[in-house]
Each structure stands twice: as structure tokens, then as C-alpha cells.
Amino acid sequence: MTTDAVSTRFTADDLAIHPLDDPVRSSLRGAHAPFAEWSGRIARYDDEVAAFVGHPPELDDQDWADLATLVGPSTRVALRGPYVPPPGWQVLGEFGSVQLEGTGLAVAPDPEAVVLTRDHVPAMLDLVARTEPGPFRVRTIEMGTYLGFLHDGELVALAGERMHPQGWTEVSAVCTDPRFRRRGLSTRLVRAVGHGIRARGEIPFLHARADNRDAIRLYESLGFTLRKRSVLTAVQTPAVDPAR
């Protein structure tokens, strides 16, 4: 569905939410509209791009039905907030997340950082699989600019841009091969990615798991500050296709 086809389901409260409180839908209504799939007030990214689902802070019966229709049966999705789904759904668990905003990030370009392209995607997927900075898919690179460091032709560190809520850009996929850690590569890449974001007149932000204290300490040392703590609820849609 297109945004126009479903806009009648949106209320003034839905559209008044701060972009960082609703980063998925804000991105998919704006800069990432080409990746958007909508059903009512529920939005998702193209599955090859990202796994994120956007939704209003309170879900009514129609929202749950639209979510199930949009993602399909027996599908795992993460919802922003503590939720008890309707019968037939399964709660898989909850985990904490922090959102940090980078108004105070000291940014700087890095002449040694390489702009990564589709040719680098296999190496990016391999590095992400080994270091687990968060989800990364075959077309995630299309979400924004990704930078990396190469050593003898091998990708050893990367970071880039993910969601683009209005006025903001998320820094994501920050990771370094274990053999090259403690050399400041992640710091340099975050500053360089932030430089590109600031050059567009936007503000960097990022997410981290609440229990990833080392990463949070690093980001705070670079000038990021805590904006919000959230609970994410992982749920699985009913096994039976609701459209049948």
C-alpha cells in the first residue's frame, strides 16, 4: 500500500509524534519512502533493506490485524514498547534499548575512510556476522552512506547511516574486526559518518542495546547523550495467514 492509500487511518496525534519517538514511520514517510510498505497505520521496510516495523505508541485491534497482514504469518517483529498482543500471537521476549542523540558529537572527515559500494556488500555482511553490531541485510547499504577501513584489501571496520527521521540520521553498523580493535577505528568512522550528516544540516543519533555498556560508554565519550530508554517487545505473528 502507499502512504496516500492509508493516510485516513492517521490521527493528528500519530503525525505529531517527535521523529525520534517514531523513527521508522518518520523515515518511511520521508527520505525512505521508496522502501516503504504500509497497511493502515503500520509501516515496514522492504525485507531486503531492513527488518524494522513502525507503529503508533498504542495499538488498537485494527493495528494488530494490519501488522499481521503486512508481515505475514509466523513472523518475528520487534515493537517499541511493552505490549501484550492479541490471542494467537506469541511473545518471544523483551529487551532494553537506549537512544542517544549526537548534538555534541565532534565530527571530522577521514581521508582514509572508503565509501563502501554494492561491491563491498559480501564483505560487509561477513564482518557484521562476525561482530554482531545489529541487523544488516543485503540492501541495507541503500539506506545511506557507509564508510569503512580496508587493510590489504580486506574490510576491517565499517559504520554508516541507517534510518532518516525528519531532521535526523541514525549512525549504525559500527563494527571492527577483533584483530583491529583498540586502534580507534570505530571512533574515526563515527566522527566521519557524523561529518556527512552534519553537512546536510541534520543531527546524528543512534541506538544501542541497554546492556551493551562498552558501546554506550564509547558513544558518550564521543559526545552522544542519552535521550530515551525504551523496552522492545519481540512478538511472533499468528501461524494462520489472517487474509485467508
Image (cartoon, grey):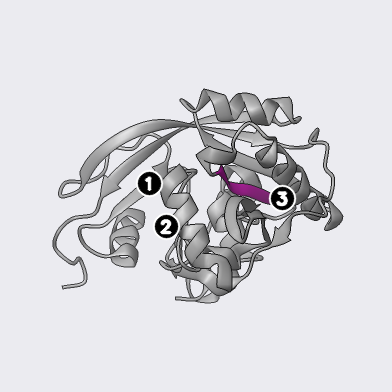
Is 137 within the magenta? Answer: no
Q: Amino acid at mark 1?
A: Ala
Q: Nearer the viewer, mark 2 or mark 1?
A: 2
What residue is pinned by disc 3? Answer: 168
Which secondary structure lies at badge 1? strand
Which secondary structure lies at badge 2? loop
Q: Quadrant of the C terminus?
A: bottom left
What residue is pinned by disc 2? Answer: 51
Q: Is residue 99 above or below residue 238?
A: above
The x, y position of residue 8, in whole percent, is 51, 67
Q: Looking at the image, can residue 6 be seen? A: yes
Q: Is residue 2 above or below residue 28?
A: below
Which secondary structure lies at badge 3? strand
Alpha carbon of mark 3 to alpha carbon of mark 2: how far? 20 Å
The answer to whether 99 appears left or right of 49 in the picture is right
The x, y position of residue 42, in whole percent, is 43, 59
Q: Is residue 216 above or below residue 65?
A: above
- Asked if the residues shown at circle 2 and circle 1 are in contact, with their CB atoms under 8 angstroms apart, the answer is yes
Alpha carbon of mark 1 to alpha carbon of mark 3: how far? 22 Å
- Asked if the residues shown at circle 1 and circle 3 are in contact, with their CB atoms under 8 angstroms apart, the answer is no
Q: Residues within 10 Å of mark 2 (few under 14, many from 20)?
A: some
Is 171 within the magenta? Answer: yes
Magenta-tinted stretch: 168-176
What residue is pinned by disc 1? Answer: 78
Q: Residue drawn 71% across and 37% down?
A: 187
